[in-house]
Structure formats: structure tokens, C-alpha cells
Image (tube, grey):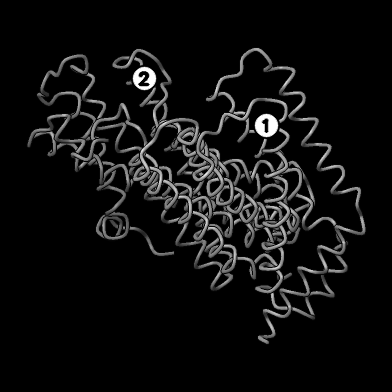
């Protein structure tokens, strides 16, 4: 097997093991999702409409993703990264982190969707359009956040920096996802939807490629 | 240092002189030239010589920042970092000017300072991205690390600029700005030949002015740096 691929596999398994070991992290993320949705439910109880539903859903996704993915580099000590430095190439490290973050982000997005549909009514008419949107949107968010958290982590471990750096970069993804979600709420043309999905996919690919190319510059000291 | 004669002065700084003259010309001609009186827009169409040029100047210096960031990543010389950060400063300045000239124009024609328009929102997000870049600069004490991290972020910010300025307005539901339906904005605005004679000099003049500002800021930055390193 290709050594880089092997490294990526081990790094991914390592991250999942850490996550499993410190179960409180998953627990707190789930609690964060449930309490955010519940607060939204109490506040927006009487104002709910399909369009509001879509907007709130994606705003919650932004906050959930920033809160869950932002831990990705901070959860291990800086010293341990010197150890990884000797073992794996920066490409392997970033791909491992991206895969791991995509995985947990996808899980959290689906959980958010589920909790959201429990509290509010599920307004989605066309799941065939909504699920790809969810997948591509969360993939882009997770990858982009992996890189911005790496930058913030290197610059000065501050959480405030993560959100400042991430919000402008998250916006195109959110706008496109929101547009697609609004389509999935009612009648739409598939030709239009495919075009937007393609733009979203393109954006994801650009973000992954940039992360792959630029991470080595962040990684080295 | 040898004395500057007028001839060498012109030889070195011709582009600054050209920029100043073109901008001066565009301001005078822009206010005096005969313009078509379109409904609602009327005399305010003269803003096209100012508002549009601000954005082109901004994009020009942001491209300069991008190029310098890429150069810095390939060859870590502090010179490139200095160029990049000062270009971003000047770009943000022109972006703010673009927003202000646009807001005044919007109040006169669309009735409000801020309207829900993909180009306005995109411009605001780009400003946020570049302001985040400047925040990142001030976050880390380590000079070399700071330069490298911000160069990486600058490349991302430029991608956002491209997405918001070029891609999203094209797939948006419609913009109040002229030309969002695929036709040339200038055709919609009924720009005539003699208006181009003001617009293009203004366009080039403001870009040169922007680079002049970058040049001044880079030299200030450099001398501050040298003063800091000088032993007391």
C-alpha cells in the first residue's frame, strides 16, 4: 500500500480513537446541537415558515461546525505534533484531518437535521436534492474549517480567531446551500438545481485542493 | 545620493505623474462632460467615472497582494510579505471608497443606502475576508510565521473575491446593477464614445494611484522596520 495512504489511514483511526476515548467531546457537541435547536424552537415557535426553516437550519449548521471542528487541532498537545512531524508528511496529516472532520461533520449535520425535524416540522419536499446539498455543504464547511483552525492554531491558539477567519470563507458555501435548500422546499427545475450543485461541488474541490497545496506552509515551523 | 534633475525625476516617477494627471483629468472631465440623461439616473451617471474605478483599483491591488503572497510562499523574502500586506491595506481603503460612492449613488437612484443586491453583499463579504486577513496579521507575534500564515489566508481571501465578484452575481436571481442579464453594463448605461474618453483614463489613473499608495506604504513600513532594528 502507498505509504501516504497508509499514514492517512492511521491518522484517521488515531483521531477516531481519541474521539472515542474522550466521549465528553461528542457528548458536548450533541448537547450543543440539541440546546441550540431547542432555543431556536422556543424563540421561533410562532414564526415558522419553510423559508425561515431553511435559513435557521443553515445558521445552526455554521455554529455547530465552528464549535465542533474548531477542536480538531487543539485536542492534542502541541508537543505531540512534533512527533507526528517526524512520522508523516504534511499532506498525510491534512488529508487525515480533512477526512476525519468530514466524517464527524456529516454525522453532526445529519443529527442536526434529525433534531430540527423533531422540534419543527420537516418542510423538505425533495430529499433527493436535499441530501446531496447537505453532503456537499458539510464537506465544504468541514474542509474549510480544518484549514482555518490550523491557521488560528498556529497563530495563537485563540478561538475568537477561528470564527473571524471562517465566517467570510463559509459564506459562499452557506449561500449556495441555502439556495438549494430553498429549492428543495417546493417546486423547482432540476436543470437549475444541477447547475448550483455543480458550482457547490466545484467550490468543495477548490477548497480541498487549496488545503492540500497550502497546508505544508502552515505545518512547518 | 546624486541630485535629482527634472529629467531623471520624470524618468523614474513617470507613472506617478501619469496617474495624478489622469485622475485630475477624469475628475474635471467627469464633472463637465455631456452625459445622456437617463430616467432616474440622470446626472448621477457621472458617478460611473468614480465608483466603478474604485473597484477596478481594488481588484488590481488585491491581485498584486495575491501574486506577492504566492511569491512569498515560494521564496520567503520579507519584501514580498511587505508588498502583500500593504496592497491589502490599500485595497481595503479602495473597497471602502467603492462602498461609499456606491451607497451615495444607491440612495439617489434606488432610494436606500443599502439594498439587497448580490454585488453589494459580495463586496461586503470580501471586505470582511480582507479585514480578517488584517486581524490575522496582528494575532501572531512571530514575524516569519505571521507572514506565512497570512500569505496562505490571502490566497483563500482572493478565491472568495473571485467567487463573489465573478461567479455568484452571475447565478444570482438578478442584480440591480446594470448588466446582470448577460449584456454589457456599459451598453445598458448607454455609455457613449466621449464618455469612454473619460472612463478609460480614469480607470488607468486610479489603478496607478492605488499602486502609488502601495509604494508609499511599503516604504513607510520598511523604514519603520529599519528604525526598530537599529541598535540604540
* Above or below, A50 relative to A157: above
Of tags 2 and 1, the one toward the viewer is 1
Who's the residue at 32% across and 21% down the image?
A: B105
Q: Is residue B184 left or right of residue B134?
A: left
Indicate the secondary structure of the residue bearing disc 1. Answer: helix
Q: Which disc number belongs to residue A186?
A: none
Provide residue A146's location: percent of width, then percent of height: 68, 56
Q: Nearer the viewer, residue A181 or B86?
A: A181
Picture quarter containing residue B108?
A: top left
Q: Which disc number belongs to residue A117?
A: 1
Q: Is residue B113 left or right of residue A61?
A: left
Provide residue A121's location: percent of width, then percent of height: 64, 25
* Above or below, A69 relative to B67: above
Q: Which residue is mark 2?
A: B104
Quarter the C terminus of chain B occupies: bottom right
Who's the residue at 44% across and 52% down the image?
A: B215
* Above or below, B64 relative to A41: below
Provide residue B104's location: percent of width, then percent of height: 36, 19
Q: How many callouts does the rendering have?
A: 2
Q: Are marks 2 and 1 in contact (CB under 8 Å)?
A: no
Indicate the secondary structure of the residue bearing disc 2. Answer: helix
* Above or below, A19 relative to A131: below
Q: Chain of mark 2?
A: B
Who's the residue at 76% across and 68% down the image?
A: A12
Quarter the N terminus of chain B occupies: bottom left
For the residues labelled 2 and 1, the Cα–Cα distance comes to 44 Å
Q: Nearer the viewer, residue B5 or B159?
A: B159
Provide residue B51's location: percent of width, then percent of height: 31, 31
Q: Is residue A41 left or right of residue B102?
A: right
Q: Chain of mark 1?
A: A
Picture quarter containing residue B229?
A: bottom right
Amino acid at each position: 500500500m502507498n505509504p501516504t495512504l497508509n499514514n492517512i489511514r492511521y491518522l484517521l483511526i488515531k483521531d477516531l480513537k481519541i474521539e472515542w476515548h474522550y466521549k465528553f467531546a461528542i457528548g458536548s457537541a450533541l448537547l450543543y446541537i440539541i440546546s441550540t435547536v431547542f432555543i431556536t424552537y422556543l424563540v421561533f415557535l410562532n414564526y415558522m415558515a419553510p423559508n425561515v426553516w431553511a435559513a435557521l437550519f443553515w445558521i445552526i449548521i455554521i455554529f455547530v461546525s465552528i464549535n465542533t471542528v474548531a477542536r480538531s487541532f487543539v485536542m492534542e498537545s502541541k508537543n505531540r505534533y512534533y512527533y507526528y512531524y517526524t512520522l508523516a508528511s504534511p499532506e498525510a496529516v491534512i488529508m487525515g484531518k480533512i477526512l476525519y472532520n468530514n466524517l464527524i461533520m456529516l454525522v453532526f449535520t445529519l443529527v442536526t437535521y434529525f433534531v430540527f425535524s423533531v422540534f419543527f416540522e420537516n418542510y423538505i419536499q425533495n430529499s433527493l436534492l436535499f441530501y446531496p446539498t447537505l453532503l456537499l455543504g458539510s464537506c465544504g464547511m468541514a474542509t474549510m474549517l480544518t484549514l482555518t483552525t490550523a491557521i488560528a492554531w498556529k497563530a495563537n491558539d485563540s478561538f475568537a480567531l477561528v470564527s473571524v477567519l471562517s465566517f467570510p470563507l463559509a459564506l459562499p458555501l452557506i449561500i449556495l446551500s441555502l439556495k438549494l435548500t430553498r429549492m428543495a422546499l417546493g417546486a423547482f427545475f432540476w436543470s437549475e438545481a444541477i447547475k448550483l450543485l455543480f458550482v457547490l461541488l466545484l467550490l468543495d474541490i477548490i477548497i480541498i485542493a487549496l488545503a492540500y497545496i497550502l497546508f505544508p506552509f502552515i505545518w512547518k515551523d | 545620493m546624486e541630485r535629482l534633475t527634472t529629467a531623471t525625476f520624470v524618468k523614474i516617477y513617470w507613472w506617478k505623474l501619469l496617474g495624478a494627471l489622469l485622475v485630475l483629468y477624469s475628475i474635471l472631465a467627469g464633472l463637465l462632460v455631456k452625459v445622456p440623461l437617463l430616467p432616474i439616473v440622470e446626472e448621477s451617471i457621472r458617478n460611473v467615472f468614480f465608483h466603478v474605478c474604485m473597484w477596478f483599483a481594488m481588484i488590481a491591488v488585491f491581485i498584486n497582494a495575491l501574486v506577492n503572497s504566492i511569491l512569498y510562499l515560494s521564496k520567503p523574502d520579507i519584501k514580498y510579505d511587505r508588498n502583500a500586506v500593504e496592497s491589502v491595506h490599500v485595497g481595503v481603503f479602495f473597497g471602502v471608497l467603492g462602498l461609499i460612492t456606491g451607497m451615495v449613488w444607491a440612495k439617489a437612484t434606488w432610494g436606500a443606502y443599502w439594498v439587497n443586491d448580490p454585488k453589494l453583499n459580495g463586496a461586503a463579504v470580501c471586505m470582511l475576508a480582507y479585514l480578517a486577513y488584517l486581524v490575522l496579521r496582528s494575532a501572531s507575534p512571530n514575524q516569519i510565521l505571521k507572514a506565512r500564515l497570512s500569505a496562505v489566508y490571502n490566497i483563500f481571501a482572493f478565491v472568495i473575491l473571485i467567487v463573489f465578484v465573478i461567479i455568484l452575481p452571475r447565478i444570482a436571481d438578478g442584480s440591480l446593477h446594470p448588466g446582470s442579464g448577460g449584456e454589457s453594463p456599459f451598453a445598458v448605461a448607454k455609455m457613449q464614445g466621449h464618455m469612454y474618453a473619460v472612463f478609460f483614463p480614469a480607470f488607468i489613473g486610479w489603478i496607478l494611484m492605488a499602486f502609488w499608495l502601495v509604494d508609499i506604504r511599503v516604504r513607510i513600513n520598511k523604514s519603520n522596520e529599519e528604525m526598530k532594528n537599529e541598535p540604540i
